[in-house]
Amino acid sequence: MSFNLYKLFFPCATENYQTSTIVLAGIPMDFTVSFKPGSRFAPAKIREVSIELEEYSIYQDKSLYDKTFCDMGDLELPFGNIERSIETIYQFACKLFEEKKVPIFLGGEHLISYPLIKAAANSNDGEFYVLHFDAHADMRDEYLGEKFSHATVMRRVGEVIGFKNIYQFGIRSGSKEEIEFAKKNSNFYFIDKWDEINNVIKDLKGKRVYLSIDIDVFDPAFAPGTGTPEPGGILSSDFFDILLKLKDLDIIGADIVEVAPYYDISDRTALLAAKIVRELILMMG
């Protein structure tokens, strides 16, 4: 199967797919967004503002110049066709995982995580775990009659990899039913339980982990450019402290989703996402 991708690059990235372990790819889909659409424009905006970043990370004492990674551009999707888009994303991600790449996906809405994680599950032997950072549990069985929605994505993921393999942090919003379901079935932590991340990291050390980061895990003061902002989130500085604690985990892939650039004229939401991408590149592979 061939894939059509548009080209726009993250700083220090190359087009050399064959020699790169880490690859970036944009997944510009926002077909099921329940409030404010526009996250399909995030991959381009994240790359655009990333030019402001230094290639050097003071946090890690590492430089992007010392890494060989590929930016594949954005995956071309059939606009408005959810079923075909999910299948296209799945097949694309399968190719990456089967070729032993460590991908970082730029969303797009959170539903893209379902085919990405499904591809990781079907392309790797043995179980792995998902660390999910979000304001919302995304554990509804359906939303407005739809099984596939950014509000149901972790419910669908749990059906693929097992709910006990999902660890959810930062949650501060959801329906009563889905919160009860998440508390009963997954490893569920409310926004005030960030200290538990230390124990979770100890438990996951030596195990394969996929990261799914919804930008609305942050307080809207730091990330206003998102489709479903939820007051009361984590500070960006605190999140970077947590992110760097994950460097000893075997991270097989990651996604950053739900940046909606048009709702943030300052671009600080996209810049925050770009900085997370930089740190992930230096941590992974």
Image (cartoon, rainbow, N blue to C red):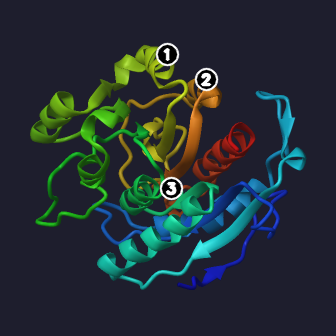
Which residue is depicted at the point 65% across and 80% down? 6
- Residue corresponding to mark 2: 245
Mark before the other along the chain sequence, 1 or 2: 1
Residue 192 falls in image quadrant: top left
Mark 3 or 2: the one toward you: 2
- Residue corresponding to mark 3: 259
Disc 3 marks which amino acid? Answer: Val
Task: Give the Cα separation between the discs numbered 3 and 2.
Answer: 24 Å
Residue 105 in view? yes
- Disc 1 is placed on an element classified as helix
Single out the residue that lies furthest toward the front. 125
Quadrant containing the C terminus in the rendered view: top right
* Residue 172, image x, y percentages: 30, 32
* Residue 119, image x, y percentages: 43, 60
- Disc 2 is placed on an element classified as helix
* Residue 280, image x, y percentages: 66, 42
1 and 2 marks in contact (CB < 8 Å) = yes
Q: Residues within 10 Å of mark 1 (few under 14, many from 20)?
A: few
Task: Give the Cα separation between the discs numbered 1 and 2.
Answer: 8 Å
Q: Residues within 10 Å of mark 2 (few under 14, many from 20)?
A: few
Residue 198 image label: 1
Please tell me which residue lies in front, 189 or 20: 20
Disc 1 marks which amino acid? Answer: Asn
Please tell me which residue lies in front, 230 or 191: 191
Mark before the other along the chain sequence, 1 or 3: 1
